[in-house]
Amino acid sequence: MLLCYTRAMKHLVIDGCSLTIPDLVAAARHHVPVVLDEDAVRRMAASRAVVEDAMKNRLVRYGITTGFGKFCSVTISDEDNATLQKNLIMSHACGQGSPFPEEVVRAMMLLRANALAVGNSGIRPLVVQRLLDMLNAGVIPVVPEQGSLGASGDLAPLSHIALVLIGMGEAWWKGERMPGSLAMARAGIQPVALEAKEGLALINGTQAMTATGALAVHDALMAYRTATITAALTFQALRGITEALDPRIHELRRQQGQIDAAHDLRRILEDSRLVTHPTGSRVQDAYALRCTPQVHGAVLTALRHVWDILSTELNAVTDNPLIFPHVMRPGGDILSGGNFHGEPLALALDYLGIAASELADLSERRLERLVNPALSEGLPAFLAINGGLNSGFMIVQYSAASLVSENKVLAHPASVDSIPSSANQEDHVSMGTIAARKARRIIEHTQRVLAMELLAACQALDLRAIQQGLPSIEDQLAPATRPAYSIVRTTVPFLDKDRVMYPDLDAAHALIAEGLIPGCVFAWSWMPDGLSAIDQIE
């Protein structure tokens, strides 16, 4: 779905200070053009002057007049510096495996340009502008997913981007994979000849893990909202008892995420004619319904934390060494540090994967209650008409259970591992890019489990209508859930007899992945920076 803010946005101006996750989504997914801020150009020029001064005065400065990593004690002459930069890019482009999706590479390019725009990296503005020219023209480097340790930054992935910038490597151009030099030529972009410090400035940073993680946390927020709406549909299909949503219960817990999750679910279920109150021997629901605010609330708390960490990192300077021009006099300081280390992201992205896994876990349990005749409050077994001849949703739950189980394996944290590299110069690494990639996979699995619950809930609601002799269940539904039900039924018809199921599941997944399910509901309790209520509406 092309969100409202992207339709209104003619271009995105980057200044190294104000990029948001929705901005990144607009540029990475919806190809909003990116423009470099004029003040950023001046800041970059000032830091570049410090690098050139160090070269002129033959100062020994890491990565400028020395080799890299363990070779930091090797001094490089002025004559060899251009070769040093090219060699750095070629030797570090050691990525393996399948390429990152185009949207992730586009996000990486945007983030690297934004970090350089802060003006503490000593790179010429020309190089950053050329990177944005590639992004805007659709020259997208082929970047293998594997090969980053997440300390000294994402050296291997970013090197594959820099390869194309200097006229090497491979790139996608108008859907075709080709040599980077050919893609640049077809786009009318001149490759760059790198000068001192510029190779290191292009590849020393956390942009692969940040790009993957920022897109993932955006999708996880949409998955949380989808899960809330889907849970509301299931709540109605199972005649859920709304007493568990009473705000007094959640305020006593004092967990803000839980309070907000209960508030959202309560509002979505307002005026439903299908929910119930304690009666007779049925005084409370099973945890899969009753504890939805507690579980979803914990997930929401995790999302808020990860969103904040990644929002900060979008505008972080993460290369080394860093350049600090003197404001009141010529010259400046060149300081070596470790901002490239991905630990802040690695921990957060492992947390994100665990939280998203729990969304899927609870969704599968609600799905089980829908298909199990011992738990479904009178619904037919496996939501099938003429069960026995038809299997209905029997294997849908199997498939959901498989994805949930795989998520449990993927949710094992990557950040607890470290393998030293570069002859023990880089003796602790974050594995943050692995954490980001795992989180992205978990979130996709979660979307698919939610799609299965969503279809099962709509099937169950239609069966309720049949049981009550009604032509449609829509009038019985809470008004806030009717648009979601309608979108599903416009896309996937009622299952009156067995048919091939995977196209239905894929179609429901597409609705969720495109953000269409949460897009039909009111403003939510938590609206992160850069994302407004209207952004949810197609």
Image (cartoon, grey):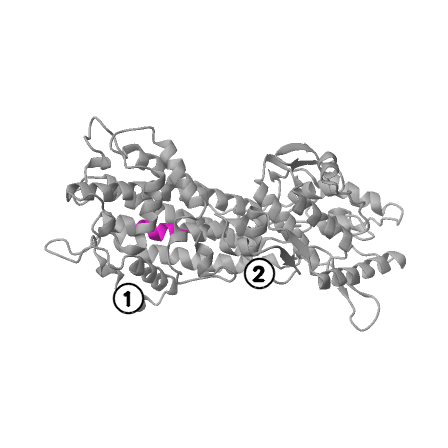
| Residue at image point 80% right, 47% down | 194
Q: Quadrant of residue 298?
A: bottom left
Q: Which residue is mark 2?
A: 312
Which residue is outermost to the left? 280
Is residue 256 toward the left or the right of residue 208 in the image?
A: left
Residue range of the region highlighted in magenta in the rendering: 224-231
- Main SS class of the magenta portion in the image: helix
Q: What type is the residue that disc 2 sits on?
A: Thr
Q: How many marks?
A: 2
Per the image, label 1 sits on a secondary structure element best described as helix
Q: Earlier in the sequence, mark 2 or mark 1?
A: 1
Q: Is residue 526 visible?
A: yes
Q: CA distance from mark 2 to mark 1?
A: 33 Å
Q: Residues within 10 Å of mark 2 (few under 14, many from 20)?
A: some
Q: Quadrant of residue 114?
A: bottom right
Point out residue 441 in the picture as x, y percentages from the top left corner: 48, 42
Point out residue 69 in the picture as x, y percentages from the top left corner: 73, 48
| Residue at image point 86% right, 45% down | 80
Q: Which residue is mark 1?
A: 247
The answer to whether 503 is drawn above or below residue 229 in the figure is above
